Image (tube, grey):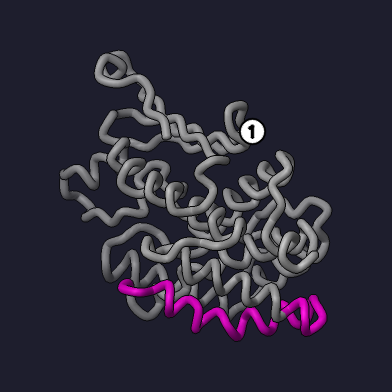
């Protein structure tokens, strides 16, 4: 089992580095990720919900969080509990890592099952790294993020939860769509999913976070408009995030060159 399976840029956050290492070595967690993919990919024909997906989400979430902090946005655990930016990174990564564990049980309402399956892990990891008070605070923040990632009717009330809600939707490159589509079937779902070539998160000029999406067909707009746009609008972070989607190819450029949120 690779100790670098999550491959996260922990930087100077030594506590996060230790926790990520523990997660990468946890046989039980690795097995649940595999079970999530058996349910999602093998049984239901959906896209990956296992270790590759959570690594992509965690990396995207960390990048967004750090860009926001660079631009003076204060994470909720810092504002409300006087904790640190490094603690906010732990919340963001843990919510990213555990958000799809519920796929091992059922697709419908899998966010609720993720909360149940995450509790033991959260207690074990957090209480080994923090005193009981801080561990309890971080656990509550992570659970809030888990409860609001998937459900459009539940608005994230923290910066960290809003970030993970957006980051989850950004795993859409080269057919890795979060909107399920049937493999081999040609319809708007499959065509749009396969139209997304590249997703990049960059430092913005108009807003702190600039998300650049490159498409090979204007059909990719379906993925952006049906999934990413609602996630951003219901994240609490709309004023900080700018999305620019461009279509490469001369013929497509005559239809639409640029799409922005």
* Residue matched to label 1: 203
* 45 relative position to 12: left or right: left
- Dominant SS in magenta: helix
In front: 91, or 82?
Answer: 82
**Residue 212 in the image: above or below residue 145:** above
Residue closer to the observer: 239 or 148: 239
In the figure, residue 152 lies in which quadrant? bottom left
Circle 1 packing at 10 Å, graded few (<14), some (14-19), many (20+), is some
**Residue 118 screen position, x and y as percent:** 55, 79
> In the orientation shown, which residue stands out farthest toward the left?
186
Name the residue at 65% across, 68% down.
Answer: 24
Quarter of the rendering containing residue 82:
bottom right
Pick the front one: 246 or 260: 260
Q: Which residues are magenta?
A: 107-135
Question: In the displayed structure, does residue 52 sit left or right of residue 181?
Answer: right
Q: Is residue 169 magenta?
A: no
For residue 128, what is the image quadrant?
bottom right
Residue 90 drawn at (x, y percent): 70, 64
């Amino acid at each position: 089992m690779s100790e670098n399976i999550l491959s996260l840029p922990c930087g100077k956050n030594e506590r996060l580095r230790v926790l990520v290492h523990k997660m990468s070595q946890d046989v039980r967690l690795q097995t649940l990720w595999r079970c999530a993919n058996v349910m999602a990919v093998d049984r239901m024909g959906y896209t990956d919900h296992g270790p590759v997906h959570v690594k992509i989400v965690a990396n995207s979430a960390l990048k967004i969080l750090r860009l926001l902090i660079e631009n003076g946005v204060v994470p909720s655990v810092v504002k409300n509990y006087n904790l640190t930016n490094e603690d906010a990174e732990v919340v963001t990564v843990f919510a990213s890592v555990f958000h799809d564990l519920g796929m091992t049980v059922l697709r419908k309402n899998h966010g609720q099952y993720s909360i149940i399956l995450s509790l033991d892990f959260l207690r074990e990891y957090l209480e080994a790294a923090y005193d009981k008070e801080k561990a309890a605070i971080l656990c509550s923040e992570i659970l809030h993020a888990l409860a609001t990632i998937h459900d459009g009717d539940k608005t994230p009330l923290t910066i960290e939860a809003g970030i993970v809600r957006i980051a989850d939707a950004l795993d859409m490159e080269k057919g890795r769509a979060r909107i399920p589509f049937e493999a081999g079937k040609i319809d708007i779902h499959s065509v749009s999913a396969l139209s997304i070539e590249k997703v990049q998160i960059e430092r913005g000029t108009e807003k702190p976070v600039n998300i650049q999406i490159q498409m090979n067909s204007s059909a990719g707009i379906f993925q952006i408009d049906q999934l990413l746009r609602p996630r951003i609008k219901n994240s609490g972070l709309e004023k900080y995030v700018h999305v620019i989607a461009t279509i490469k190819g001369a013929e497509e450029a005559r239809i639409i060159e640029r799409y922005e949120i």
